[in-house]
Amino acid sequence: MTKFERWSVWSTSGATIVSGAVYLWMKYFMTSADPYAVINHPLQPLVLKIHILVSPLLVFALGLIALKHVAEHLRRKVRAGRRSGLLLAGSAVPMVVSGYLIQVLTDQTWLKIAALTHIVTGTLFALGAAAHWAAVLRRKNGSNGRALNRPPGDRNRLPQEYARK
């Protein structure tokens, strides 16, 4: 991945995960002192707006790396970070779809199903992102049992064992 792709994915993932977690906390775990309040915290609408504005950037960033990183690593059977990467990819699709459905559904039953799906898959995405970040750091530091021994300028390319023949 290029520096821009890496920055795009990790910054939008972080912003989406943090804004989603803060909104989840405000909506479901806080209670307002005012019995007539429709929100639990004065910043709740702002946090929701931030989440809704930054999430499409995450979708764009994931699309940016889908073929070059995800599909290429699957095709080459790269093992480093595979489980966490599959968790990320597998949870991203239902997370995105349920996120859009939350905004357009009007039936309360389907809305609750979409919200629960979004919370579960968003949590899985966050866990996958943390695990993938740890796998990236292990690989970068060579602590996975196979040091890469590549010069610093060569770190954005796949190791020689994965190079096209």
Image (tube, grey):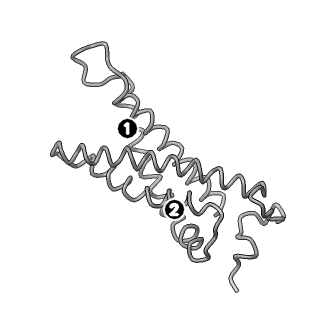
Secondary structure under tag 2 reads: helix
Count of numbered circles in the view: 2
Which quadrant is home to the N terminus? bottom right
The residue carrying pointer 1 sits among few (fewer than 14), some (14 to 19) or many (20 or more) residues within 10 Å by Cα, namely some
Eyeballing the image, is 140 above or below 47?
Answer: below
Q: Is residue 70 above or below residue 129?
A: below
Specify which label sits upstream in the sequence, 1 or 2.
1
Q: Nearer the viewer, residue 123 or 16?
A: 123
Q: Secondary structure at mark 1?
A: helix
Quadrant showing the C terminus: bottom right
Q: Which residue is mark 2?
A: 86
Q: Quadrant of residue 112?
A: top left
Image coordinates of residue 72 in percent, x first then y, are: 58, 73
Residue 19 higher or lower than 30, as above or below: below
Q: Which residue is mark 1?
A: 49
Q: Quadrant of residue 70?
A: bottom right
Say which quarter of the image contains residue 68. bottom right
Q: Type of residue at label 1?
A: Lys
Amino acid type of the residue that numbered disc 2 sits on in the rendered structure: Leu
Residue positioned most to the front: 145
Residue furthest left in the image: 107
Q: Give x and y (percent) for residue 74.
A: 56, 72
